[in-house]
Amino acid sequence: MEKKVIIIGGGLSGLIAGSYLRMNGYETEVFEMHSLPGGLCTSWQKKGYTIDGCIHWLVGSGPSDNFYNLWNELIDLTKLSFVNHEVYHHVEDAEGKMIRIFCNIDRLEAELLDKAPEDARLIRTLCRAVRKLSRYNFPNDKATGEMNLADGLKFLTRTIPCLGIMRKYIHMTASEYALQYKNPILQKAFEHMFVPEMSVLFLFFTLAWMNKGSAGYPVGGSLAFARLFEEKYLQLGGLIHYSSKVKRIIYSPYEESIVASGIELENGEIHSSDIVISAADGYSTIWEMLEGKFLDRKVVSVYHDFKLFPSYLQVSLGIKGKLDVPNHCMLLPLEKPVMIDPETETGQLQVLVHHFDPTLAPEGSTLVTSLIPTYYAEYWTQLKKNEPEAYNFEKQRVAGILIRLLEKRFGIRQEHIEMTDVSSPATVIRYTNNRNGSFEGWLLHPNTGFRRISKTLAGLNNFYMIGQWVEPGGGLPSCLMSGRNVTRIICKKDGRKFRNRVYRLTGT
């Protein structure tokens, strides 16, 4: 008889875990609060445009990286079209000077040395590090706790050449790293490529992934990508229940322990299982669904000390016609700093012109988006709840900042704009329930480094957590490894040999 596993959350982590569990003979049911799969890996439609909310690049899009083989355990990447950009980022100042962050490391080095010769020493050090990291492959086939001495030695041998780079940069933020440079545009480029508070090591690895051609963008956008995993999971015989928010995780005594034994939905339905996996928000899982009953010092420390990724506003514009822009992703200065909300001010906007994906806009038109980070999610949620008219006004005010920037920089006039959409932190919370609207959970921060977070909670058996709340740094590769590794852990506990392909389902 198959063991039954309930998975809370139909984002990528939940769907991936469900697929691997089905490959290994477990009965699975996914319960998702939204009406769509993917969680934060999503897109939505408005006036003929597909507004993309997630993937800018996919680690493992090419065979030069180990993740390529892992993705292909679940979906066929050869059937996807990937765009490998020539330039990842284009940064300008108010005088029109600019620096381009090329994906190819040789071209990047030439560009930076040409535009910022005063920083030649740092530039060459950066490029040497990126070349070395380009030869490094991250994922292990085995989960933590499975590796034996031989596996550990193999991992160490592979890591030693890059160990010095990791140790040096893991404890340095992007802001701290940027300040080492003398050139002000280069400072801005490195500080704002990602989140300024994030460990700069992530920047180094991203440049390495791009350099080796394994960080392409999948044409069709994020929801289309998530649908591939939904399709795989359903093909394997898994069940998904949409619009089914979980209220609590049921646990009960068994012999001398306490085990997770099912869930209760908000509508009162009870569903029993042998194992429960939460791929949902960590805060609501631990303090609401489990009522804070299974805490220890390590868990409290993580949720008290770790830093979250910010939330964001996403302004999307549908523009009739093709934009003549120097690059698809640009960091452009504003005439003067503007307030986004009472705790967020910015002097520049990142502008993403999606002309590289014609599926996102009607023929002859262009989708433009801007992501604006903020840590003040509460302001937006309270404004939406208590003052809906003011909330809508503020969203349109923020959209106006982008519109005026495009008008000044590219001559876009109001009559060119045929679609406007603004997603706020309140939108993120509404559809994902993510704490503070965070877009990737725990930040890869210097204070946390590569510190691991347990997938289990003290005193509760047959329960696991996966996804961005146990994988600092977030991102789609973490979803893949989290769902795959929890299956390996469960298989090992049950004395089963882990299978990563459809070999034999119970009863067939």
Image: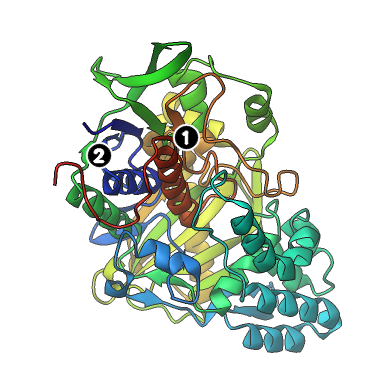
Observer-side mark, 2 or 1, equals: 1
Q: Is residue 53 above or below residue 31?
A: below
As rendered, which of 178 and 94 lies closer to the eye? 178
Give residue 277's position: percent from left, percent from top: 40, 33
Quarter of the picture holding the N terminus: top left
On the image, which quarter does residue 150 sit in? Answer: bottom right
Label 2 environment density (alpha carbons within 10 Å; few <14, some 14–19, many ≥20): few
Helix or strand or loop: what does disc 2 sit on?
Answer: loop
Task: Determine which residue is flagged by label 1.
Answer: 465
Task: Determine which residue is flagged by label 2.
Answer: 35
- With 214 as the anchor, is 91 left or right in this view? right
Inspect this view and state whether residue 188 appears: no
Q: Is residue 226 above or below residue 82?
A: above
Kind of residue at disc 1: Met
Kind of residue at disc 2: Ser
Label 1 environment density (alpha carbons within 10 Å; few <14, some 14–19, many ≥20): many
Residue sitting at 69 percent across and 72 percent down?
Answer: 94
* Colouring used for the render: rainbow
Q: CA distance from mark 2 to mark 1?
A: 22 Å
- With 183 as the anchor, is 192 left or right in this view? left
Residue sitting at 65 percent across and 88 percent down?
Answer: 106
Give residue 39's position: percent from left, percent from top: 37, 44
Give residue 414's position: percent from left, percent from top: 39, 64
Helix or strand or loop: what does disc 1 sit on?
Answer: strand
Inspect this view and state whether residue 388 appears: yes
